[in-house]
Each structure stands twice: as structure tokens, then as C-alpha cells.
Amino acid sequence: MKNSNNNGKLVSAILVGAAIGGILGILFAPDKGSETRKKISSKGNDLTDAVKEKFDEFLDKFKKEVESVKDQATDFAENGKAAVEKFSS
């Protein structure tokens, strides 16, 4: 789980760095104000989409982990119940 956390931090840092670099590049480009605003808006939309995608991936992984833990707990409970019934008889 720790490795997943580190990967998530790395991806987040890369996304933020790319967004900052893109915005700075646009701001220093010799374009009209309206063109610059369109480019910033476009980059913002791209960043929003990337963040949504990463969040969805995170949720999918989280749901799978929860299901796995839930299945393990169910198996543990069933095995414990069977052991209790075996020794009770």
C-alpha cells in the first residue's frame, strides 16, 4: 500500500509541474490576451480531466482493496465459526 501512495504522490507532482509549466509558457508567449485566456482555459480543462481520471483510478483501486478485505474477513469469520462448531460438538 505504501508503494501505491508513493506512486500517487509522484503522479500528482508530475501533473502539478506540467500544469505550472504549461501556464507559465502560455503567460510568457507573445499572444493576444484573448488567445492566452483560451489557452489557459484549455490547459485547465486538460488538467481537470487528468485529475478526474487519476481520482477514478484511485477509487477503483480502493474499491477493489475494500472488497478484498471484506472477502478475507468473511472467510476468517466462516473458518472461525466452523472451528467453534467443531470443538463444541
Image (cartoon, grey):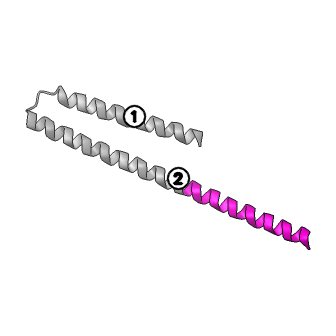
User: Which residue is found at the position 28% from the left and 44% from the top?
Assistant: 46
Membership of 69 in magenta stretch: yes
- The amino acid type, in three-letter code, at marker 1 is Ile
Q: Earlier in the sequence, mark 1 or mark 2?
A: 1
Q: Residue shown at 26%/33% (left/top)?
A: 22
Residue carrying label 1: 14
Residue 47: name its quadrant.
top left
Question: Where does residue 86 sit, x and y in percent of width and height?
Answer: 88, 70
Residue interval drawn in magenta: 64-89
Left/right of residue 68 with respect to residue 22 in the rendered view: right
Above or below residue 48? Residue 30 is above
Choose between 81 and 19: the one closer to the eye: 81
Of residues 30 and 64, the one nearer the viewer is: 64
Residue pictured at 85% horizontal, 66% vertical: 83
Which residue lies under the disc numbered 2? 62
From the image, give the main secondary structure of the stretch colored magenta.
Answer: helix
Picture coordinates of residue 49 (x, y %)?
32, 48
Which secondary structure, mark 2? helix
Amino acid type assigned to the residue bearing label 2 in the image: Phe
The N terminus, quarter of image: top right
User: Is residue 13 located in the magenta-colored stretch of the structure?
Assistant: no
Farthest front residue in view: 88
